[in-house]
Amino acid sequence: MGIKLYYTTVTASREVKSQQAEVMRILDSKSIHYELIDISVGGAIRDEMRTKSGNPTAVPPQIFNEDQYCGNYEMFSEAVEADTVEQFLKMA
C-alpha cells in the first residue's frame, strides 16, 4: 500500500484528534486507500515517524507515500485548498 498515515489513538489533544479525523475523511472522500500506523503502540514507531519526517518533534498526523515524506496536517490542508492532494501525496 502506498499512502501511510501516522496517527495516535492516545492523545489528550482535541486538535490532533480533529486533524487526524479530517485527513482520514478527505482521503476517504477521494477514495484514496491508506494504511494507518498508530504511534501510540510503542516509542519505536513514533521515533520511526520522526526520523522519516526529518523532524525530531513531529506529532501526528504525518503523511507518507511508502517511505517518502509528503507532509504534516498543515501542508495537507494547504494541498486540499489548492486542490493538489494527489500531487501532495506524490501520486500524480
Image (tube, grey):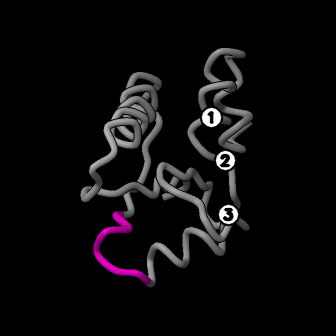
Q: Residues within 10 Å of mark 3 (few under 14, many from 20)?
A: many
Reading the image, the residue beneath label 1 is 74
**Residue 11 is a magenta residue:** no
Q: Answer with the quarter of the image where residue 53 lies.
A: bottom right
Name the amino acid, label 2.
Gly
Check contact, mark 2 vs mark 3: CB within 8 A.
Answer: no
Residue 4, relative to residue 29: is it above or below? below
Magenta span of residues: 38-43
Quadrant position of the C terminus in the picture: top right
Give the amino acid type for the residue marked by disc 1 in the picture. Answer: Glu
Q: Tell me the CA gap for discs 2 and 3.
A: 8 Å
Give the residue at x 71% y 37%: 88
Residue position marked by numbered label 3 in the rendering = 53
Name the foreground residue: 6 vs 16: 16
Determine crowd level at label 2: few under 14, some 14-19, many 20+ residues with C-alpha closer than 10 A: some
Residue underneath mark 2: 71
Pointers 1 and 2 in contact (CB under 8 A)?
Answer: yes
Q: Residue at x 44, y 77 (%)?
A: 45
SS category of the residue bearing label 2: strand
* Secondary structure found at label 1: helix
Residue 89 place in picture, x, y as percent: 65, 42
Closer to the chain start, of discs 1 and 3, is: 3
Q: Residue at x 43, y 48 (%)?
A: 34
Which residue sits at x=34%, y=80%?
Answer: 42
